[in-house]
Amino acid sequence: MTRNSAKSMAFPVTYDVRLLFAVLFLVGIGLVMVYSASSAVALDKFKSDAFFLKKQALFAGLGIVSLVVCSHIPYRLYRLLAYPLMLLGLGLLLAVHIPGLGLSAGGSLRWLQFGSFSFQPMEMARLGLIFYLAYSLSKKQASLHIFSIGFVPHLVILGFFCIALMLQPDFGSVVIFTTLTWLLMFIAGVPLKHLLSVMVPVLPAGVLAMLMADYRLARLLSFLDPWKDPTGAGYQVTQSLIAFGVGGFWGTGIAQGHQKLFYLPEPHTDFVFAVIGEEMGFWGVLFILALYATILWRGYRIATACEDDFGMLVAAGITFALALQVSINMGVCLSLLPPKGLTLPFLSYGGTSLMFNMASIGILTNIGAQHARHTRKI
């Protein structure tokens, strides 16, 4: 897989209208659904039903700015910054353990607190890992078939990220980072036998890590049969399923749902998809899926049309990361996957996630614009 990477780094940006339409439409729906899902909770806790909406609207504005800025930054610049960005992401993951900086929520240290501003470093770390893998794998194209060159160094770097995530602990992100790394190595051309060689020790270790923590085991058991303990370990999932059941084909109507009224936990973050299912119904869910499919399709087209390996792998990494996040969140809400605290891109409340996801779309836009210089259609 040899591609020409000697082009100039500077070029005018051509916006991908289909990609931007899907993203901005999702952000707009997200603002509506965040208000609908959070108004009762916000009124109860903060005496203002628009508390979360105002913050989400602010971050949506900042996210649009980050999208525009990143769309004008030549993506090849990230090749030069691959190692610094990777180290920055890893450092931020470890910084949560610094007294006064780390913010604990739900028994885990996954946030950094700077005054009144909180920041989730996992988002930056994931992007840093994508840049590192894209740079390293593209640079070693001729040697990827060598185990000690094409596989081991990337496994070691992944190991550092996984250790930092387990210390929080955040087992779900470990699964995402590992899956993303394996996918990018496979796309780049690392032999399948190398990728499969570590599955024998890794899979038992993953099972052991799950069994050693009571809360992880409880999540697994509740996923297998949430109705066995509907008021305990299976409470979140059963309430989510009830929301989808009540919504039916046409939904109850925007702001007319009941599960968000202190029945469904985290209705504006992890389980906003369940609120959408209740209020927008089956057809509303299909529309949301169509918008996500458009984003993933455009990401795929940009990646496959890219002129050089680095840009192709960055585009593929961003696209796969979004696909994994969407699949896991929806899978949890529909009881297809074990519970994992993960937001739904562009729809869930959360400033860090929204801004980094929109910045990622800006990077995708820039990669697509490079190809648009030489052909009218991707």
Image: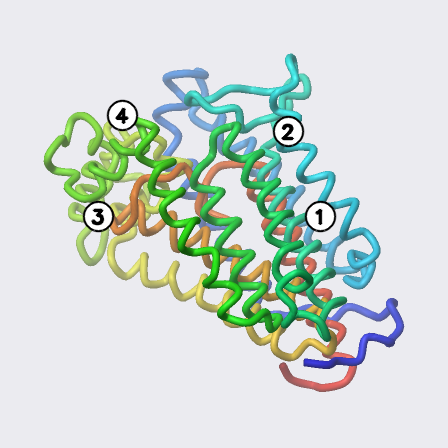
Would you place residue 371 above or below residue 123 in this image?
Answer: below
Q: Nearer the viewer, mark 4 or mark 2?
A: 2
Whether residue 60 is visible: no
Q: Amino acid at mark 1?
A: Val
Q: Indicate the quadrant where residue 153 lies.
A: bottom right
Q: How many marks?
A: 4
Give the residue displayed 43% in from the left and 20% down from the top: 107
Q: Label 4, on which residue? A: 262
- Give the residue type at disc 2: Leu
Q: Label 3, on which residue?
A: 244
Residue sitting at 85 percent across and 70 percent down? 11
Q: Residue furthest left?
A: 228
- Crowding around mark 2 (Cα neighbors within 10 Å: few <14, some 14 to 19, many 20+) is many
Q: Position of residue 207 (x, y in %)?
A: 34, 42
> Which residue is depicted at the point 43% across and 56% down?
199
Badge 4 crowding class, 10 Å Cα cut-off, few under 14, some 14 to 19, many 20 or more, is: few
Specify which label sits upstream in the sequence, 2 or 3.
2
Q: CA distance from mark 1 to mark 3?
A: 34 Å
Which residue, given by chain and number where applicable, does mark 1 sit on?
65
Marks 1/2 in contact by CB < 8 Å: the verdict is no
- Front tag of 2 and 3: 2
Q: Residue at x 55, y 62 (%)?
A: 319
The CA distance from mark 1 to mark 2 is 28 Å
Q: Position of residue 100 (x, y in %)?
A: 65, 13
Q: Which residue matches tag 2?
A: 94
The first of marks 4 and 2 along the sequence is: 2
Name the N-terminal-most of marks 4 and 3.
Answer: 3
